[in-house]
Amino acid sequence: MRTSSDPTFPLFPTFAFLGFVLSLIPLPWHIQAWNSGTCAFMIWTGTACLIGFVNSLVWAGNVDNPAPVWCDISSKIILGVSVGIPAATLCISRRLYYLTACNTVSITREDKRRMVLIDLCIAVGMPAIIMILHYIVQGHRFDILEDIGCYPVVYNTLPAYFLYFMWPVVFGAISFVFSAMTLRSFWIRRVQFNQLITSNSSMSISRYLRLVLLALIDMMCTLPLGIYSIYIGNKGVGLAPWISWEDTHFNFSRVALVPALIWRSDPSFQTSMELSRWLPVVCAFLFFALFGFAAEAKKHYKLAFWAVMKVFGIRPAPAKQSSGLKSYR
């Protein structure tokens, strides 16, 4: 077995696997609460961590091509993740603004269903469309980078900026506006806040505030990172003219095999690669830090623990009966 030249090995695969597990732990109760934006965020993040984990192990110290079908699928999903995470965060920001700005305090089942459908169109539909449109500016099948694994190819031409590059920035900019309006609406209508939260069984005050914090982090990070990613990913790469479909897709089945010595020799490209694979891991840990220690999370951990213990015949001690005398301390 060849030795990886990655200075973060085995740190990255370890954290990527932990990110995959941690990002999916809160998923069941967010599904139960109809929080479709946060569910999409967890699924996109968890998927990216899983792909990063597998790729960093399979392609540690080599540029072989043992699983071309896996690379076809995973490279396309990597591209979708770069759009899906900002799109999911936009859904969270939009939902928060709706909760703080709506004139009625009661949210019907039909309202929830409508919000879920809109969230799915944004967080799943838009990335799926962009993944399909990416084929227009996909210069060849995929790249394999030593220590990184399969990676999507985007031909640096003007249509690529409209079909792919601009969308994380667009979603980040819209999310920034929604988050700013949420804070403004929350401040103006803070008197109605407790009544709004009480009427919404799927949203507690602590969960709402954690979502607000996530939106604030999004305001500070998504838009700047989206702009920086475009800059650093294309630094030193000239903008090629769009000549024709045939020119762009000439020798499309080609797979570029790039040793670590080559791609790490370009500081800008190395920064772009490390940023793209570490950001989902950071998102997973950040999300778990916000939602993994909440009261509802601890309740589900307890239920899961005793469900496992029940298999071994261990049951929780029965709750003690309180005496008839009340304490007024």
Image (cartoon, rainbow, N blue to C red):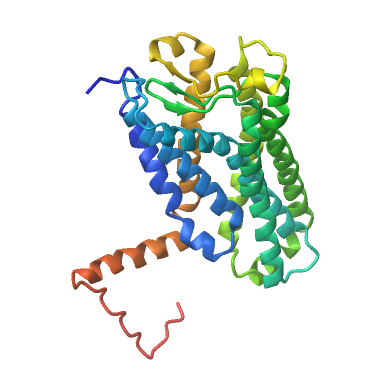
Q: Which residue: 53% across, 28% down? A: 152
The residue at the point 35 percent across, 88 percent down is 323
Task: Specify whether 7 is left or right of 23.
Answer: left
Q: Give the quadrant of the N terminus.
A: top left
Can you say whether 235 is above or below 288 in the image?
Answer: above
Q: Is residue 207 above or below residue 248?
A: below
Which residue sits at x=75%, y=41%? Answer: 177
In the picture provided, is 142 more to the left or to the right than 234? left
Image position, residue 146 (x, y; %)? 38, 20
Q: Position of residue 24 (x, y in %)?
A: 44, 51
Q: Residue at x 61, y 52 (%)?
A: 37
* The C terminus, quarter of image: bottom left
Q: Position of residue 58 (x, y in %)?
A: 32, 30
Residue 55 placement: quadrant: top left
For residue 217, say whether it is visible: no
Left or right, residue 206 beside residue 315: right
Residue farthest to the bottom?
324
In the image shown, does 88 or 63 lie closer to the viewer?
A: 63
**Where residue 326 appears, x then y in whole percent?**
42, 86
In-front residue for pair 284/113: 113
Question: Hey, which quadrant is residue 139 in on the image?
Answer: top right
Q: Is residue 273 above or below residue 219?
A: above
User: Residue 223, relative to residue 248: is it above or below?
Assistant: below
Count of numbered badges drawn on the protein: 0
Q: Can you see residue 32?
A: yes
